[in-house]
Image (tube, rainbow, N blue to C red):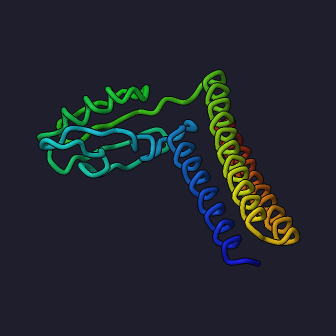
Amino acid sequence: MNEEVELILDVAEEQMNESLSKLDSMLSKIRAGKASPQMLSAVKLDYYGSVTPLSQTANINTPDSQTISIQPFDKSIIGDIEKAIVEANLGLNPMNNGELIMINVPALTEERRRVLVKQVKSESENCKVSVRNVRQKTNDEIKKLFKDGLSEDMARDAESSVQILTDKFISIIDKRFVGKEKEMMTI
């Protein structure tokens, strides 16, 4: 295959992988009833004048499946951490004992699980749209190369390769959705 075509296909695969990474990141933030340090990945606080992720200011652990413990490196910021968690609007209620912060993660109700599954489905669909947009853009580039002298057979093969790549990523997205749905609906 032509070097330009191979480069275009490599870029398409890279962009589809980026979409998948974003989906994985979003799915890790949606809780499934189990405590997880990733639940706090969006929490940032003012740490000596700069906005810093919580994970860079404290140790975050899960002693059991319903509890998150946060032990700050600097005990003087324990109030700031507590405030940042509340302001992040994650629906979590931090409790401060002066040494560390404990968060009890409540079990999810059936209704809440269904809402979260809808959110996961929406994120999965957005990822599929992103992958399909990459396919469309890549096919447009291949058609442009065809107009500039790429053989018809090479153009058809390249478009076929793009479709195979797209199908592969759509299948991966579907598997991730089914896995997350199963995880969330299991009590």
Question: Is 147 placed left or right of 78 in the picture?
Answer: right
Q: Residue furthest front?
A: 148
Q: Measured along the vertical axis of the image, is residue 18 above or below residue 66? A: below
x and y percentages locating residue 87 in the rendered image: 32, 26
Residue situated in front as seen by the camera: 25 or 108: 25
Q: Position of residue 29 (x, y in %)?
A: 50, 41
Percent coordinates x, y for residue 186 in the rendering: 68, 38
Q: Is residue 142 above or below residue 40?
A: below
Q: Is residue 137 left or right of residue 156?
A: left
Q: Which residue is more in the foreground, 50 or 153?
A: 153
Q: Which residue lies at the image location 73% right of the left edge and 45% below the top edge? A: 178
Q: Is residue 26 left or right of residue 179?
A: left
> Toward which corner of the image does residue 158 lie, by quadrant?
bottom right
Q: Residue at x 39, y 26 (%)?
A: 89
**Quarter of the image where one finds residue 8:** bottom right
Position of residue 33 measured from the top left corner of the image (x, y, whole percent): 55, 36
Q: Nearer the viewer, residue 55 or 33?
A: 55
Q: Residue at x 65, y 63 (%)?
A: 13
Quadrant location of the N terminus? bottom right
User: In the image, is 68 to the left or to the right of 9?
Assistant: left
The number of callouts visible is: 0
